[in-house]
Amino acid sequence: MATVGDKKLDKTTPDSAWKDILTAEEYRIIRKKGTEPAGSGKYNKFDSEGTFVCAGCQAPLYDSNTKFSSGCGWPAFYDNLPDTVDRHTDMTMGMKRVEITCKNCGGHLGHVFEGEGFNNPKDERHCVNSVSIKFKPKS
């Protein structure tokens, strides 16, 4: 996990610390539940072996083997690493959606959609903001 000085970054990290650590865009998306424009993220059409970690706290979230091309305009994964992502009901768009956040720091990742007919083992699409993740190549 990332640290600032001797402080571990997690759900108890104060908002003031996140403002110091993250860029304005990262803060808007990760801490304020924003969304980057479709097709603008650097990981949308990215295809390398490794692990995607939380851009806020560096907690591992997704293995590159679960990333797939969904055509939605954001990076898509069909499953997260075990016990790394929380799901919450989100009614902000006037309909029920499922928001996904980093289990460690609570940072907003995006939304998960089920039953869309994608040919993957779970028929899920974790629609994740590129700003919310960073890539660590397989060593």
Image (cartoon, rainbow, N blue to C red):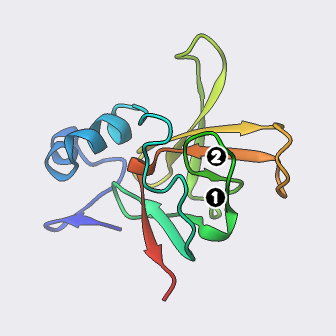
Q: Is residue 89 above or below residue 18?
A: above
Instruction: Write down the residue under mark 1.
Output: 80
Residue 126, numbered label = 2
User: Residue at image x 22%, y 46%?
Assistant: 18
User: Residue at image x 67%, y 53%?
Assistant: 69
In the rendered structure, which disc, 2 or 1, sits on the residue that comes first in sequence? 1
Q: Amino acid at mark 1?
A: Asn
Identify the image quadrant of the N terminus: bottom left
Q: Amino acid at mark 2?
A: His
Q: Is residue 17 above or below residue 89?
A: below
Q: Nearer the viewer, residue 122 or 102?
A: 122
Q: Nearer the viewer, residue 88 or 78?
A: 78
Asked if marks 2 and 1 touch (Cβ < 8 Å), the reply is yes
Please state the horizontal and vertical placement of residue 25, each as a whole percent of the image: 27, 40
User: Residue at image x 52%, y 16%?
Assistant: 92
Residue at the farthest bottom position: 139
Crowd rating for badge 1 (residues with CA inside 10 Å; few <14, some 14–19, many 20+)? some
Q: Nearer the viewer, residue 100 or 43?
A: 43
Q: CA distance from mark 2 to mark 1?
A: 8 Å
Residue 104 lies left or right of residue 1; in this view the side is: right
User: Residue at image x 31%, y 47%?
Assistant: 12
